[in-house]
Image (cartoon, coloured by chain):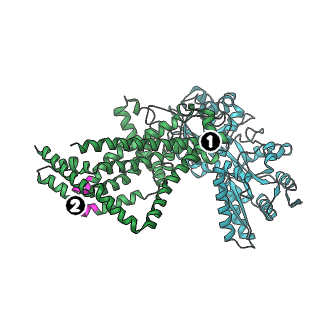
Amino acid sequence: MAINYEKKIQREQWELKQASFSSHARLKKESRVFKEDPFFRYLSALCASFILVIMLGILIELYRHSHLSITTFGIKFIYTSAWDPVKKEFGALASIYGTLISTLIAMLIAVPLSLVISLFLTELAPPIITKPVGYAIELLAAIPSIIYGMWGLFVFAPFMSGYIQPALSNNLGFLPLFQGPPMGIGILTAGIILSFMILPFITAMMRDVFKMVPAVVKESAYGMGATTWEVTSKVTMRYGLSGLVGASFLGLGRAIGETMAVTFVIGNYRQISASLFSAGNTIASTLANEFAEATEPLYLSSLLQLGLILFLITIMIQALTQLWLIRIQKGIGKL
Amino acid sequence: MKSVLVKILGILLGLGLGGMGSAQSPVINGAGASFPYPLYAKWAYDYEQITKIKVNYQSIGSGGGIAQIKAKTVDFGASDAPLTKEELDQAGLIQFPMIIGGVVLVVNLKGVKSGELKLTPELLADIFLGKITRWNDPAILKVNPKLKIPHQSIIVVRRSDGSGTTWIFTNYLDKVSKEWHEKVGTDKSVAWPCGVGGKGNEGVAQYVQQISGGIGYVEFAYALENNMTWTLLQNKAGKFVAPTIETFQSAGANADWQNAPGFYMLLTDQPGENSWPITGASYILIHKNQTSPGAKEMLKFFSWCLKNGAGTAEKLHYVPIPKNLVELIEKQWTNVTYQGKKIWQ
């Protein structure tokens, strides 16, 4: 029963929103602005177009410079993992694997945690806690990544090798994921450090998303007798879904391209191993390590092609999410 | 793209520093290897105190140093790996050694102290090839019969970034192991058969200190500063030697510089009972035809470093260039010209 009422409220709320922002009203409003201020319109359009120009520029430059490597190795570059500057054989698979796995670990840890923290801050915590914690999150987000890297190498890696990795291999050692010597550094450590780094970003944005949910919507749900959990999961989270996904993806964007912190703790060995304890590398860490000393044209070109691949991976993930969001929102509309 | 970036950076740097210094105090710009950076920076500071001439050295890596001097964005480049005579002639460059340093092996083994563990070239190559994987391997025990070595797996630690130190180390392995030569080779970064990579000497030092059973290679100064456990290594004469300023010097002294065109000399695996086998020189690269009137000042600076900088070098655990070699180097400078005229007599 309660759920049906809730759905009805949601539906009404949604219709209300649609009406107030209906395309007709918006157009009318905008056209007035356009008439009054064409200069500002063109200026802002020009600024906006810069974003596209820069993106295209990066894409074209990356392609131009990786052309040598693309023509030399072809599609083989993506599915082989040989990386031998002496014999001039290059393949990206191990780096792509390391990038995806470390980012996946980071997201698996950071997204649920951020969700819970931001819900606590907006829904449950008294203001006396909300404010200082909010500031702390913003401060955390401002820490440079090299600091996370140093901290990871000097403090967190010994902690991992001393406590967490032995505990994991003693209890879950039957899984290939947690086998191998506990070195402290490796893909798992890199993933966890990454999750620390993106957590404040995602939390800060999710908190803002939740704050934007109109109080009247939540209050009406409470009025129907919904519990805090029901309001949170069925009203607040749904209302801000696209914002939440957007927040997660900004975090993912940072994790997938993070360079210094990962380079410090991932172990930098080009291999694909089932164990999360083993050393690995990512596209960004390879670039950070080798760009300065790459003087051979083919070597340099291969590194730039790695950059191109990273760029394309990010675009693909972004596009897939947008598609998924569109589908989800259609589903909500049909409620 | 990189070269354009490097150029822009170089120009910006030049402009910034040029703007800072007035007409009376010229600025000499250099860039390259990070291995000699602490020493070059100290030399530059001392020299400025005496002469008011500013030397600005950017530690960007040997590869970057070579690229920048070729692009003429700096007055001198620095590299840990020498260029061959052909490469030098092609770019119109000359090179000369500035200091000598040693690469040492450090381990993290419980109960094993500095200078206790003995390694032979074969053992070292097999460890870094991933063929010997445990510390209690019979081959290691045979060389170290009295030492109590823990039963542990070996974890190889090496550089993850391109580096002149790696170049010297792989050059040594390349010389002493046929298998290394065939499988891996010599370069500033190679396809390592095993192990984990730390960024920079400090990264390798940190990894070895953290990973029980780890073995890595670092520059001598890093091993000393971090109080790490270094090993003995068997040299070409069959003697086990310790890494010290004297053994590095011995390796440098036994080299035949006179007959090395363009000072192309690899100090690894040198003869001599007292020579440390993994020794290398760090080089300076300059253009043969100088385009800046400040070129003479630059050579004066190098001359001052070679003649008066030995004390500073030793304090920082580098080996100064022997006197007879300094003479050879200065003789080579007579080939340097500015507007068609010789600038060094």
Depicted A73 relative to depicted B265: above or below: above
Question: How crowded is the residue under tag 1: few (<14 C-alpha within 10 Å), some, or many (20+)?
Answer: many
Q: Dot 1 lies on which element?
A: helix
Query: Is A93 left, or right, of B314 in this rendering?
Result: left
Q: Badge 1 is on which residue? A: A301
Task: Write down the region rendered in magenta.
Answer: A119-130
Which of these two is toward me, A140 or B149?
Answer: A140
Quadrant of the image for the N terminus of chain A? top left
Residue A290: in sight, yes or no?
yes
Residue contact at pointers 1 and 2, CB within 8 angstroms: no
Counting from the top left corner in percent of width and height, residue B64 is at 67, 50
Disc 2, SS: loop
**Chain B is shown in which shade?**
cyan
Q: Is residue B212 left or right of residue A326?
A: right
Q: Quadrant of the C terminus of chain A?
A: top left
Percent of width and height locating residue A24: 29, 57
A44 or B289: nearer the viewer: A44
Question: What is the display colour for chain A?
Answer: green
Q: Amino acid at mark 1?
A: Ser
Residue A290 figure quarter: top right
Front-most of residues B109 and A204:
A204
Residue A126 tag number: 2
Q: Is residue A228 above or below residue A94?
A: below
**Dot 2 amino acid type:** Pro
Towards the viewer: B79 or A232: A232
Q: Chain of mark 1?
A: A
Q: Earlier in the sequence, mark 1 or mark 2?
A: 2
Magenta stretch: includes residue A80: no
